[in-house]
Image (cartoon, coloured by chain):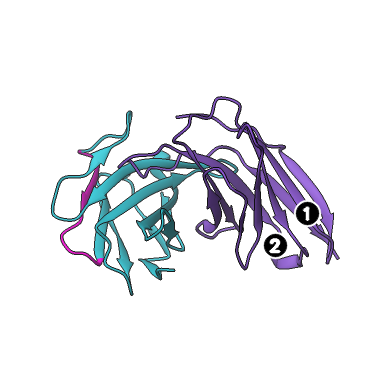
Chain colours: A cyan, B purple
Amino acid sequence: GAVVSQHPSRVICKSGTSVKIECRSLDFQATTMFWYRQFPKQSLMLMATSNEGSKATYEQGVEKDKFLINHASLTLSTLTVTSAHPEDSSFYICSVRGQADTQYFGPGTRLTVL
Amino acid sequence: DAKTTQPNSMESNEEEPVHLPCNHSTISGTDYIHWYRQLPSQGPEYVIHGLTSNVNNRMASLAIAEDRKSSTLILHRATLRDAAVYYCILREGGSNYKLTFGKGTLLTVNP
């Protein structure tokens, strides 16, 4: 399967600042990537679908102006949390749509907003 | 998205088989049955998927009921590393490859 990395693995920031999370597909050309969020003790929630070279498709209730997604290449997608607030603290996970109807997930990024 | 129902938690003993059930009574003819698992503080990991026929791979087996309204993930010999939350997910056929995660089953493996 595809190897997916995320950077950073953990980030702590002050309220009001912006944070960028990178998702890289190391050995697979990812035309489609997904971004999820997971709060403690809860399941993953899909935030958006990102297709290389086009605008992301956001799920209902996810603010596109707050969670900026860029998928400019077949190996990199970025999620920028703008003007982060404590309620944005969460575990952010990306995935790559692989062959044979599978998704390969990154290790996740733990965001803490103070 | 069609929904699935799984037990909140299950326990097993090391080196014994584990059968994780999933009900999906509203499944449509084009829905694929996917299983992923998530270890603590990690991203999910693909386990197996199928449409109508039973499937086997190096990690597990997937047994799908004839009416497709339920399925069972089978771990043939549980190890401590299999302790995780297991998610049964229905993925709609077509070009939409989104996965909608439910609460899953927390599997505890006793030594």
Q: Is residue A103 above or below residue B15?
A: above
* Residue A109 in view of the camera: no
* Picture residue at 81% right of the left edge, 50% below the top: B11
Q: Amino acid at mark 2?
A: Asp
The Cα atoms of the two marked residues, 1 and 2, are separated by: 10 Å
**Quarter containing the N terminus of chain A:** bottom left
Q: Position of residue A21 (x, y in %)?
A: 31, 59
Find disc 1 in the rendering and name its residue: B18
Magenta region: A65-75
Foreground residue among B85 and B60? B60
Circle 2 chain: B
Mark 1 touches mark 2? (CB < 8 Å): yes
Q: Is residue B81 above or below residue B68?
A: below
Residue A68 lies in the magenta stretch: yes
Foreground residue among B54 and A63? B54
Question: What mark, if any, has residue B82 been given in the picture?
Answer: 2
Occupied quadrant, residue B47: bottom right
Foreground residue among A87 and B42? B42
